[in-house]
Every structure is written in C-alpha cells, then in structure tokens.
Amino acid sequence: MLTENFLLVAALLLFVSVLAGKAAYRLGAPALLLFLGVGMLFGYNDFVSFNSVEGAQFIGMIAMCIILFSGGMDTKFSEIKPVLAPGIVMATLGVVLTTLIVGGFIYMLAPYLGVEIPLTMSFLLAATMSSTDSASVFSIMRSKKQGLKENLRPMLELESGSNDPMAYILTVMLVGIVADGTAIDWVDAGRVFLVQMIVGAILGYGFGRASVFVLNRINIRSNPSLYSVLLLACALFTYSFTSLVNGNGYLAVYIAGLVVGNLRIVYRNMLTTFFDSFTWLLQIILFLALGLLVDVDALLKPDVMFMGLAVGVFMIIVARPISTFVCMAPFRGYSLRARSYVSWVGLRGAVPIIFALYPMTSNIPNAEYIFNVVFLVTIISLVIQGTTVSSMANWLNLSFEEPESKFKLTVPDHIRSEFSEVEVNESMLDRGDTLKDIKLPGNTLVVMVCRGENYFVPKGYTKLQKGDKLLVVTDNNEELIKKAKDLGIKKFIKV
C-alpha cells in the first residue's frame, strides 16, 4: 500500500503543478514560482512529508544537468557569438562582484537584526545567491511570445546558462573555509577556478562532439526512441566524468548541449521534443521537492524575514545593477536602456536553493538559517522580477512582437530545403493576383496558403488576397530573402 500511496501523491502533485503552470501563464507569473508554491502548500504541517536534504540535492543535480544540456541544445551559436564576450564577463566577474557586494551588506546588516554572522559566512550566504537561475530564465524567456532588441535574449540566456559554475566554485570553496575555520586563500581559489573552467570547457566540447559522432554512427533506427535514451546517457556521463576529474560538470554539460544543438544529428526534432518535455518534468519535480523541504514556520521568523526581505530588495536595486553596469562598461554597443534591463532580469530560482543545501550537508553552523534566507530571497526575486520580465521590456521600449508562423512543420534534419512563411502584400499583386503572376526564384514553390483559418493547396491560377500567408519551400533561401525584400515583404518567417 505504501507504494500505491506514494504514486497517488506524486500523480496528484504533478497534476496540480500542471494546472498551476497553466494559471501562471494566464496571470503572467513564472510557472516555477507556482510549482514552488504547490510544494510549500502540500508540505505545510507535513501533509506530504519530505525531509531528505541529500535527496533534494541529488534531484537538483540531475535536474540542473538536463536543464543546462537542453538549454544548450536550444541555443544557436550564431545567436550567442555576437554576445559571447559580455555574456562570459557577466557569468564570471558578475558573480564575483555580486558575492562581494551582497556579502558585505549581509555582514553590516546582521548586527542590527541581532544575528551573528562572521564575514566568511556572509560571503558564503551571498555566493549561494550569486548566479542567475537558468531554469527560471530559460522557461520565462521562451514562454513569452516576445522578442528583445539589441540581441539581449541570447545574452541573458548565455549568462544564466554559464554562470552556475562560478557560483558553484565559490560556494564549495567557502563551505570548506567555514567548515575548517581557515582564511581565504585567493591564490588557491584562483587555481581551482581556472582548472575547473578549463577542464570543464575542454571536456564539454569533446563529449559534445563524441555524442554527435555516436548518435550519427550507431544504427538503432529500428527503434528511434532509443536515441533519446542514448543522448540522455551522454549528457549524464558528461557531467559525472567531468566532475570526477575535477572539472566543472555544469559548464561541461552546457557546452556539450551547445555543441550537439549546433551540429547535424539524426532525429533532431524527436530529441528536442523529448528533452523539452523531460526538462519541464524535472523542473516541476525539483521545485516541488524544494517547496516540500522548506519549513514555512521557519521562514516566518522575524530574523529570517527581515534578512530575506532586505537582501532580496538590496540585490534587485543595488547589487545586480552595480555588477551589471561594471561588467558591461567595456561594451559600448549597449544602450542605457539595455543595461538597465539586463540588471533587472537577474532572476534567482532553483540553483541558489540547491547551492544553499551544501552547507546543510556539510554540517555548517546556522546552515538552516542560510537555506531559509536564500529560499525567501528566491521567492522575492521570482515575484518581483519574474512577473515583470515582459512589462519591463515594454516600459524600456526594448520589446517587439516575435513573429509566429501559422504553419507548424516537423521536417527531418537531413532535408536541406528550407520552409518559410510569407505574407502577401499589395506590391506582390502588382502584376496580377494569381499565384503564377508572382515571380519567385528558381527551385522555390508555394506549397500551401492560409487565408484566415482556412488552409488549402494552391494552383497556378489560384487568386491570392492581401494578407494571405504562403508556405514557401526553397533550396536557395538567400535568393528568396533577397526577392522578398525587392517585393517589400515585411513579414518573412522561417518555419
């Protein structure tokens, strides 16, 4: 009966979380915030009991592996290449600056709240919260049908996907220092950082290439679903092996995903769908577990509440803006509005809470206090920043409507022809209103027309109307784009 009860509760939690995710989309709130809330609600008064710190840490490790790998797969290198420099600076120097600024603030604030927090403990608390959360940023940025000017979206995703290693190194280093009671050895810390980042980057790239090689060479086409299992094994092996040889597993798995996503692989669409679904499942499980783990009564203690509120607000309006403007100072291509938006989208999420578990597993004094403060800061960040990602972009005039195609296609990766959507305008109809009157480049065909909510296959004599959406397939996309510009076509969407 125990197994059946566990499955019943697990199914109920997942069902409620999915409904909460739907409600979050309608309300414009981060779905992950409501997942966390569902966990806290079911965990209150031990309605659903989950008290395993090690279990939550293990779930967090698995979830972060897949979230980062999937995020890397969905990121086009051509998009992040122009923002590589600012993204890396934000992911490294930005994390260090945040730790120093917030750590100093906590150390000065603690005596006024009647809490004794040594300087190293203050820096440890700050380090756990120093990185933006990739799960939160990926899910919010990609669920909004909204584009961002000045190439901000790929930069924010690059920062959030690659700044966890720096925060992880700082957290683990400071946990060891607090546990041993020794002073900070900055030279040794720098050496550890360089080794972990270099080893992580090299192995991540190497395992990414190896994963592509294995996927394309191994023949299991009789059961294509096994390709998803194979790629999942590659992702987990990349993280575990890299961590085993003292590299940074989080960086390695993100880079491996980036390599896999930017090279030709078999069954790409199936693999992408699998990892998207699996990522959402793991995010739900992770946030539910963290919500179940927290003690709501402990969050409501005055010292925790005041510290969490003060640190949360300080990070949003002081620490994040300072670190952002310092890191982006050398990059003159960004406007003041763009820098301000980057400073605002510094969301905290699952990663800080996971890092806050490390002091607990290492039996650091006041570790539960650190966990509760970090949990409260995360909630504040998701409520204030997470719910205003879209409105802040609109207010700063940095957003634009991201075009969405009327045609949904799944095209095998080996097919080199490209599908695009073109909207008929007046200039296209100058020579006549039938399909044969439109001069298209060679090797280009119109295969379907969408008029309102109706879809039909056109013939040469089919009469077109302004506003019709044409599904066009071509072997020469560059020539088609040039022809579209000559015809004054403004809406040209790659399907």
Image (cartoon, grey):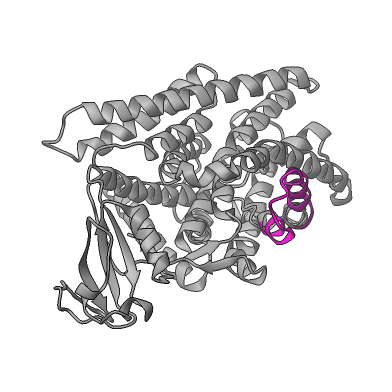
Instruction: Look at the image and tell me in which quarter the C terminus lies.
Output: bottom left
The residue located at (32%, 55%) in the rendering is 11
Can residue 366 be seen from the camera position used here?
no
Which quadrant holds residue 121? Answer: top right
Would residue 333 be seen by someone viewing this image from the given angle? yes
Q: Position of residue 224 (x, y in %)?
A: 17, 39
User: Where residue 187 appears, x then y in whole percent?
Assistant: 76, 18
Q: Nearer the viewer, residue 332 or 244?
A: 332
Q: Is residue 493 left or right of residue 329?
A: left
Q: In this view, does 90 lie to the left or right of 196?
A: right
In depth, the one of 367 and 256 nearer the eye is 256
- Image quadrant where residue 23 sits: bottom left
**155 relative to 20 in the view: left or right:** right
Instruction: Find out whether residue 334 is within the magenta segment.
Output: yes
Residue 438 at x, y percent in the picture: 26, 72
Residue 98 on the magenta segment: no
Label the magenta part by its dominant secondary structure. helix
Q: Identify whether 247 is placed above or below 287.
A: above
Q: In this view, does 461 lie to the left or right of 105?
A: left
Name the one closer to the observer, 254 or 361. Answer: 254
147 versus 284 height, above or below: below
What residue range appears in magenta? 317-341
Residue 320: percent from left, percent from top: 73, 50
Instruction: Identify the residue at the far front of this view.
Output: 431
Residue at left offset 67%, top offset 38%: 89
